[in-house]
Each structure stands twice: as structure tokens, then as C-alpha cells.
Image: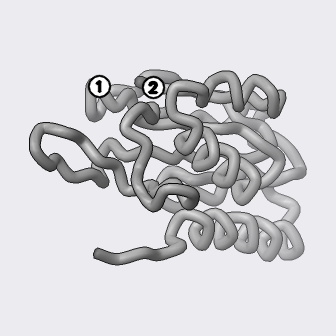
Amino acid sequence: MEIDFGGIGKEYAVDSTRQLLSRNTKDSFMVNYGGDCHAHASGPLADGSAWMTGIENPRRPGDAGAVIQLKRGALATSGDVFKFILQDGKRYGHILNPSTGWPDTDSPLSVTVAAATCTEAGILSTLAMLQGNHAENFLDRQAVKYWCYR
């Protein structure tokens, strides 16, 4: 077993890279580290269009379940589509509930959140995973845009 902080570390790295680049260029750009991304705060591409990014539908790998136009802000996805084990016919994801030490077996397959920073989006998407069947209610209360796949 291994416990790591890869999710929040990657999201922080996205935000830090965006900060560094924005101090050194006036050009528009998107930082994307393995699907967690942040569009440069100055706005859209030079021609006025938005950055296009897809969210994979976990029920149909390789298929973009949603295509998002992102001019500013960040997206982060949490899920257990690829990181799980099957034990005695039961699926256990890799995101552990700190109060029980176990994964929630009723969690969505994936949750993507749009927020001002990648770190914020990642925290909210992971917390939503920990809400199990109540993930959408939790995200509605946070007043963020999200995509949830079950």
C-alpha cells in the first residue's frame, strides 16, 4: 500500500507554473498536467476563442463525455476509474475517507470541477468523491460548475 499527496501536489504545481509563466509573458496559455489544467488569467487565445479541453467519460474510455471551452480558470478531476482494486466482487477506489480509513463504495467514478485555481478545483472534486451518493448535493452547495459521472 502507498499513500501519497499526488493529487494536491499536481494541482499546486499547475497553479505555480501558471503564476510563473504569467509573470514572464503576456501571451495566453494553458498549463495542463495530466488533465488538471489552468488557463492563463489574461484571457482567451489571441483570436478570441477559448481553450478546448475534454472530460473523458469513464463508462466509455477514450470518449470525451464533455468538451469544455475554458477562457480563464482551472479544472481538476478526481476519480477512481483507473485506480481501484476488486476484492470479493466489490470495487474499492483509491480515495480514502479520513474518518473511516476506507474508500466510499458509493462514490462517483469521476468528478471534474471548474474553479478559480486548480488547487481549489482539486480539493472540491476530491471532497465530492468522499460524499458518495451526496456528491452532487455537496457541489451544488459550493456553487461551482462540475461534471459528475457515475
Say which residue appears at 27% left-offset and 33% top-offset.
61
Q: Residues within 10 Å of mark 1 (few under 14, many from 20)?
A: few
Say which residue appears at 56% left-offset and 60% top-offset.
98
Q: Nearer the viewer, residue 39 or 101?
A: 101
Q: Secondary structure at mark 1?
A: loop
Q: Earlier in the sequence, mark 2 or mark 1?
A: 1
Determine contact: label 2, label 1, CB under 8 Å.
Answer: yes
Q: Secondary structure at mark 2?
A: strand
In three-dimensional space, the C-alpha distance between marks 2 and 1, rounded to whole angstroms, equals 8 Å
Rendered view: 62 above or below 127: above
- The quadrant in which residue 99 appears is bottom right
What residue is shown with label 2? 149
Q: Is residue 14 left or right of residue 116?
A: left
The extreme front residue here reads: 100
What residue is shown with label 1? 59
Q: Amino acid at mark 2?
A: Tyr
Q: Is residue 100 left or right of residue 14?
A: left
Image quarter (top left, top right, bottom left or bottom right) of the C terminus: top left
Q: Nearer the viewer, residue 79 or 22?
A: 79
- The quadrant in which residue 32 appears is bottom right
x and y percentages locating residue 118 in the rendered image = 70, 55
Say which residue appears at 60% left-offset and 30% top-offset.
135
Q: Amino acid at mark 1?
A: Arg
- The quadrant in which residue 141 appears is top right
